[in-house]
Image: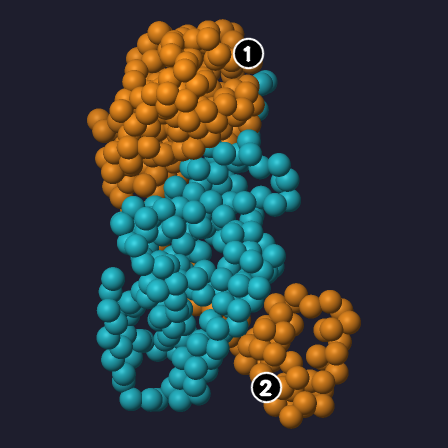
Chain colours: A cyan, B orange
Amino acid sequence: MDVLNIFSRQRESRKKLEQQRARLYRIAYAWTHNPALADDLAQEALAKALQKSGQLRDPAAFDAWLYSILANCYYDHFRRLRESEDIDDIVLAHDVTPEHESGAREIVHKVRAAIARLPGGQRQVVTLVDIEGFSYMEVAQILSIPIGTVMSRLCRARGALKQDLLRDLARPAAAPEVNLRRIK
Amino acid sequence: MSHEKFSDEFLNAFVDGELAPEEKSRVLLDMSQDEALNRRVCELKTLHDLVRTGYQNPPQSGSTPRATGDTRYRANIAAAVTLAFGILLGWLLREPVGLRTAAGPAPSQMPAPDTRTAGAAARAAPGDAAPARVLIHINDNNAVHLAQALDEVEALLAYYRAHRQNAVVEVVVNGAGLDLVRADVSAFPDRVEALLKEHRNLTIAACQNTIERLAREAGIAAQLLPGVTVIDSGVAQIMRRQQQGWAYIQV
């Protein structure tokens, strides 16, 4: 029956969307390190994606298209806050002190703290490539930047992460350090 | 130091699988002979894995609608199915094409709850007194876009009506989008009028600046369709609405 089909389809696509939501949330969280904000951004991106679903010509490009909407929501958020500085200049503070954590959790916190210290543009590129496995070309489309910029941002991001993480992990018992950062 | 012939960008591309097979084998060959190069690649791979690990289980927001939405979905399913079944059946019998727009590709059914909450920090449960507020912005006169925009408006309003959700939808037209509501040139005058007549919670607002510009530059006195309101400036209205927490959708 038609109506029953509609319901089962609706349920399926709801499930599919929930899966997308989790992925969008993960990236939004990696960009903002703020669960509530990441949640809002993922939600907003999904809503926009659904509204604009007619504009998607090539279903194969769905992922890149969806994340470009998320990136726009992210930029809009900063615009709404009337933050006029370049997104690259925004440095997020990370309030977790990993000293009391152990093992795997400590690594996770260190990684997040290091990512949070990256400039916004680099953070976006490195998370899209490493977490979601997007190709450079797709990242360029998502963020509307040239592919050369993707490569240079990725290179700078990994350079900074290397300094921050590899050196740190090599000396796990290092003295506790306090990172004070200015929040804009 | 043969490894220095590879730039960091190049090695990143190698680690991320962006190189052509030929270039890839060149790096692999060099790696087997060059300890330092091997270490550089290994570090990059480790960083890649670390970032991945760092976000495998991101902390969930306390108010995440995933949990509440899912529970809500299950809890209300019996009531919702009964209610929606009747309403959808009504729609189906009334206007088969309309149903396809409103419920056919399932996603178009669902933007509403997302849109309702988009941008707002607080999440309201369905049936909450706070109305969903959606602004749809149209600024071009491409007939396909306009038809699509009207489809969206119709589907959105139908959704809210079917789910008895309190909602207000405002369509702001400016620039070339003004054509939609100009009595002399509108491609869909009947549809616009019918929508306005049928839905009290729909406003279509035309930009006064655009109307004035049309008069000034083309000498055209725009005659608007009945029911269309005029606002000082489309852009200013969009900004006002966004500041008030409206969901903004550009079609």
Classify 10 Å Cα crowding around label 2: few (below 14), some (14-19), many (20 and above). few
Q: Distance from label 2 to label 1 (Cα)?
A: 65 Å
The C terminus of chain A appears in which quarter of the rendering?
bottom left
- Residue at the left extreme of this rendering: B129
Chain containing the residue with disc 1: B
Which residue does the numbered mark 1 point to in the structure image? B96
Measured along the vertical axis of the image, is residue B94 above or below residue B207? above
Marker count (numbered):
2
Q: Are marks 2 and 1 on the same chain?
A: yes
Residue at image point 55% right, 11% down = B96
Q: Which residue is mark 2?
A: B39
Say above or below: B171 vs B242.
above
Q: Secondary structure at mark 1?
A: helix
Q: Residue B216, image x and y in percent?
A: 37, 20
Q: Amino acid type of disc 1?
A: Pro
The x, y position of residue A75, in whole percent, is: 38, 50
